[in-house]
Amino acid sequence: MTVAGKTTLTPYFISTITWVLASPFLYGFHIAALNQVQSALQCFKAVPEEPSPPYTAPITHGFPVCIPMSNATFGFVTSVFTIGGLLGSLSSTHLMNKYGRKGAVKFNSGFILAGSVLMTIAWNSELLIAGRFIIGIGAGIAMCVGPIFLSEIAPQKIKGSVGVMNQLSVVFGLLLAQAIGLSFSTPDTHRWRVVFLTSSVLCLLQLLLSAGVADTPNWLTAVGRETEADDIASKLWRDHSPGSQRSPRPQHEALHAEAQSLLAEGADAEDDGRSTSSGNETTIPPLSVADLFKLEPLRKPVTAVLLAMFGQQISGINAVIFYSNAILSRVMPGAEGYISLGIAILNVIMTFPAVYLIERLGRRSLLLGSMLAVEISLIALALGLNGGVIALSTVAILAFVGSFAIGLGPVPFVLIGELVPFYAASATSSLALSVNWITNFVVGVGFLPLRDWLSSEDPTKPNGRKGEGQIFFLFAGAFAVTALLFAKEYRK
């Protein structure tokens, strides 16, 4: 495969990105891993009422066929994934800098493997919670290292398209989890455990295949292994000139010069053996999160990345998905189990155009266009819910999912590896994903209480509420402010 007539991609390049993409794939897989199997896992299909002690699940092959727990306990099993994800993101800077991008991927795969095994063999809710938490740590690392790894091995001409594959892999993971869960949610059997067994096998395979993958040329150069870096670069890009792919991009030159100046001012810079005299950005030691805001040229790009990540979650994507089942089940009664699968398929379909459009329209245009469509969809959903117009609500949900998938979903991850230079990438990724996880958690915890506070019970509708769309007006307002701030910070 030849890019722009100059750089030939090799089978090694294809195999490397496939190996890396297993990490965001597993993240997406575990976002949806519990969705379809909840009833079978929680014993809802075994007993008519909410299953809580003293109900005892039947034991076969040494394990209970389901694990009785209240809705509150199951909610904690689900949400502890986010707490683990935050811890994983916070630790990713250290892992990527010390053990390399490849080492961080192996850590994320190891954590997810350990958590998946625990959930596969779980016989009580405590093991489910522990496994889900450990998986969250691995997922947090995965979403930090994946975009950076892809950015550092992709030729300049197709960095955006390769970067979008991170999100494409996420939505494929979501789709597989929904499909397997729907197929293996049979009550009174162990079939729900196949979901977590599948994850275990995928993680084990990724770890075994790591022996055939090298670290990125950028990281190898940064740790003084320049000969090895050139060898790997030539394996990735056949028509490669040594060092050319790792030279700083023009937009990083000012940052590079100021970083050299900042480090030169440190009294212990020389004592630490850190070289700042070379013209290559990979010779500057990785910055900490605090250092990101000491460099004035870094503030705008870092702020733009943070706003994009914040916007992803403050758009209310998880709340919209929550309502999609309730609303679309009215349009397609009896097909509740297939609605989530259909949304996942739509997500995959609408992410594909971004692979092409990101290089044609540019990152800013694609992201801002997506944000505008998301804003319109949020307002339409609020109006549809408040007015009880199911058709409008249905169209708004589908439009929202499509609009999110084509830009707001993939592009923020691409920006992490492109707006900042090598030595700031790890810290920026860790900070940005931490913001993403925190916002995700806050929105998840606050959504239902806020919805109930902004609406009132409707006695004419079973389980219905008046003004339940008000919460989406709130999301629309917060998201609009975020989008405007992002547009101001990210001019090019």
Image: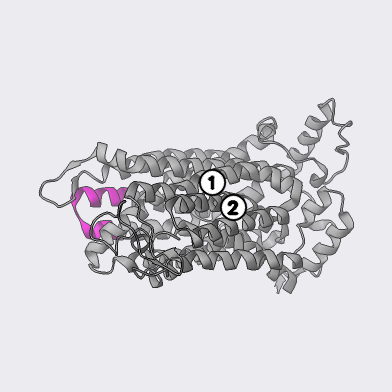
Q: Earlier in the sequence, mark 2 or mark 1?
A: 1
| Residue 84 circle label | 1
Q: Amino acid at mark 2?
A: Gly
User: In this orientation, which residue lies closer to the viewer: 467 or 451?
Assistant: 451
Mark 2: which secondary structure? helix
Q: Are marks 2 and 1 in contact (CB under 8 Å)?
A: yes
Q: Measuring 80% from the left and 68% from the top, which residue is drawn there?
A: 235
Asked whether the viewer can see residue 487, the reply is: no
User: In this orientation, which residue lies closer to the viewer: 223 or 374?
Assistant: 223
Q: Measuring 66% from the left and 35% from the top, which residue is drawn there?
A: 289
User: In this orientation, which residue lies closer to the viewer: 8 or 125?
Assistant: 125
Mark 1: which secondary structure? helix
The image shows residue 456 at horizontal and vertical percentages of 19, 40
Look at the image and give the residue range highlighted in magenta: 379-394
Instruction: Examine the rendered structure and indicate whether residue 475 appears above or below residue 328.
Output: above
User: In this orientation, which residue lies closer to the viewer: 429 or 131?
Assistant: 131
Does the magenta stretch mainly form a helix, a strand or a loop?
A: helix
* Quadrant position of residue 327: bottom left
Left or right of residue 304: residue 288: right
Asked whether the viewer can see residue 158, the reply is: yes
The image shows residue 107 at horizontal and vertical percentages of 66, 53
